[in-house]
């Protein structure tokens, strides 16, 4: 998807651009192309961005380590303020307290909006934190041989020496 130049979006019909897509996104491995639609509307001093997207990803179960396929569906919307940063650096200071206004996403009014990067972020946020192949997954089977191993032959000399020492 191409970047959307914000001043050009302000001149578009109804100040809106809708993008239908079906493509693989760089940085996220999927079994099927990410498909859906993305709508960007210029509202004067902010952009209203919304998207519907679907794909299938392969995840690893956190209990049994088996891989499984998971349908990833995103229905996201966000307001992105159009404002120039005061210092131009675009970074937040780490040595002072921040207000809620500092934590709002913003773009310069004469800049561009990257729909691919925004969609990538929304998909990454939609990946479940607790990845289970099944709610009743019992995890990895552990045998008694692993829980109670015999004496390792390499330590046998120390084991015999242990018996000779006073308690």
Image: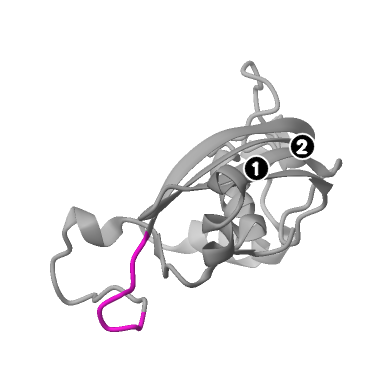
Residue 85 is inside the magenta segment: yes
The one nearer the camera, 79 or 5, is 5
* Lateral position of residue 35 relative to residue 10, left or right: right
Q: Which residues are magenta?
A: 82-89
Q: Nearer the viewer, mark 1 or mark 2?
A: 1
Secondary structure mostly seen in magenta is loop
Vertical position of residue 9 compared to residue 58: above or below:
below
Residue 37 is inside the magenta segment: no
The one nearer the camera, 141 or 84, is 84
Disc with the residue nearer the chain's start (1 vs 2):
1
x and y, in percent, of residue 167 in the image? 35, 56
SS of the residue under disc 1: strand
Question: Furthest residue to the left?
Answer: 97
* Lateral position of residue 46 relative to residue 134, left or right: left
x and y, in percent, of residue 115 in the image? 63, 56
The one nearer the camera, 109 or 125, is 109
Q: Residue at x 61, y 62 (%)?
A: 114
Crowding around mark 1 (Cα neighbors within 10 Å: few <14, some 14 to 19, many 20+) is many
x and y, in percent, of residue 117 in the image? 62, 60
Q: Which quarter of the rendering shows the N terminus? A: bottom right
Could you say which quadrant of the image residue 105 lies in?
bottom left
């Amino acid at each position: 998807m191409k970047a959307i130049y914000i001043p050009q979006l302000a001149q578009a019909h109804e100040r809106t651009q809708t993008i239908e897509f079906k493509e693989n996104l760089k940085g996220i491995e999927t079994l099927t192309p990410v498909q859906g639609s993305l709508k960007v509307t210029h509202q004067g001093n902010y952009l209203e961005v919304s998207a519907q997207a679907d794909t299938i990803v392969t995840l690893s179960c956190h209990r049994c380590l088996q891989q499984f396929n998971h349908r990833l569906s995103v229905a996201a919307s966000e307001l992105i303020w159009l404002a120039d940063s005061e210092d131009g650096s675009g970074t937040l200071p780490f040595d002072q307290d921040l207000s809620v206004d500092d934590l709002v996403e913003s773009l310069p009014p004469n800049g561009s909006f990257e729909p691919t990067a925004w969609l990538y972020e929304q998909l990454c946020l939609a990946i479940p934190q607790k990845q289970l192949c099944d709610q009743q997954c019992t995890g990895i089977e552990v045998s008694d041989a692993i829980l109670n191993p015999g004496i390792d032959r390499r330590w046998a000399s120390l084991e015999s020496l242990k018996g000779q020492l006073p308690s």
